[in-house]
Amino acid sequence: MHHHETELTALQGSGCLIGSRGESAVATLFDELRKRHVIEAEQLHRLGAEVPSARLSRARLYLDDEKREAAMASSRKYLETHIEWLGLGEGSRALQLEDLCARVALQHFTAVDVEDLELPEEARRSCDRFTNDGVAEQFLLDSGRSVFILAGEELNFVTDMESCCVSREEDPLAVERLQTEFEQRLVAALTRALGGKPAKAMVQSISRAMSQSGMANMERACKGPQIVVSGGEQKLRYELVGIGLNTWEVRASMWKGCFEDFVVVEDRDIDCENPSGKVTVLRCSPKSQISRRSTIRFELHGGSVHADVCSFTDETRILDTCEKPMVINTRGTSLAFQRSWGTTLFQRARSMVQLLTSRHEVFRCVLCRRRARGMAAATVAQSARLRVLPGMAIVPSESRGTADDDLEGAMRAPLRGVPAQV
């Protein structure tokens, strides 16, 4: 075996039974991923589209039987180290199956990202880019809209702007200079928190996890349709804690609330022939909220990084305008509002209907789905008579990072030009 064992290979199962719940969680995840990539491959073939190498490499992970079985073995090994979640340990209480599936999914996506660091560029499954020191570019792009706690030191760009009495609207050049200085301090603090002279692979793994790229993995791990909110408030927080020799934990949290409109992007199948039900704009109570938290442990072994998802919770509570829970079905449509809101859209937003039925612009097209999050707010704004919430950010459709070919993930958009909210 190669001297540097890859993440997935190092985690391959030893044959220890994980019970029917564990097997169900693993089988469900990889069966869904395989089916999704089969559909995607068929669509790309019909369209005659040029496929980026990263997308092809990711597809092979699920379409190649040997590679998929190896990844499934890794997931089983992961569950073997957390048998308390399966209710198999003495005095342990099993997780709900949905929560168990989410942790298995997040572990798999994180392990793939870590394994990518040791693969040649042409074999990688993502398009993440890093500085010469190993800092993820997405980490820097997101620095202005997140709160960082690095070895007990808090860094908050919004607080820095307030203390300097500057704003993007009044003095964008001053804010740009301030942000450049903040990024430099952030990288220096990250280096100190990782021991002063950290391994490049560790810097890459942790800086990527502490960015929108890591948040996208959390979103992909959640079951159900993708929900993209318009306006409201958002809080992103990343904490880096050293817990032992060459071992650190990234504790990430995301909260969204105070929004009154959202877009549901159905994310279970990709049907290029039938656009109905793929993208739905809905109203909701401002008391609705979405909260996600995760803890991922990173350990350095012989120059290679090992990742272990220790916890992951997803709490999505969407209330209708009467503050009653909304039920979103598997097609991404509100059962309570499907008819009334659908009628409103056709009567009051003809331009949006044309957008959704256009062959080249439709979100359910495999070539355009990666832009769905970034275009969600713009879709609401383009609907001629739909109300645009104050402070709603129109996210640029172009981005840097891994969104370039991440069909299941979230839009990773740069901070530049987007108001930061903490």
Image (spheres, helix red, strand yellow):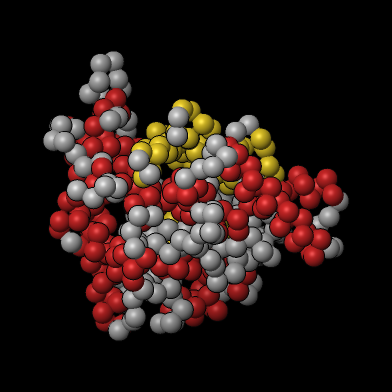
> Which residue occupies the foreground of this view, 74 or 42?
74
Q: Position of residue 226 (x, y in %)?
A: 44, 56
> Which residue occupies the foreground of this view, 148 or 225?
148
**How many discs mark residues in the rendered view?**
0
* Residue placed furthest toward the top: 91
Give me the residue at 62% from left, 48% from top. Answer: 187
Q: Is residue 49 above or below residue 8?
A: below
Q: Is residue 128 above or below residue 284?
A: below
> Which residue occupies the foreground of this view, 365 or 415?
415
Quadrant of the rendered structure where residue 41 is?
A: bottom left
Quadrant of the rendered structure where residue 420 is?
A: bottom right
Q: Is residue 399 above or below residue 65?
A: below
Give me the residue at 46% from left, 61% from top. Answer: 128
Horizontal placement of 415 versus 125: left or right? right
Q: Position of residue 368 (x, y in %)?
A: 43, 73
> Which residue occupies the foreground of this view, 409 or 239?
239
Q: Position of residue 366 (x, y in %)?
A: 36, 72
Give me the residue at 79% from left, 50% from top. Answer: 161
Note whether residue 272 is visible.
yes
Give me the residue at 75% from left, 61% from top. Answer: 176
Q: Position of residue 319 (x, y in %)?
A: 53, 45
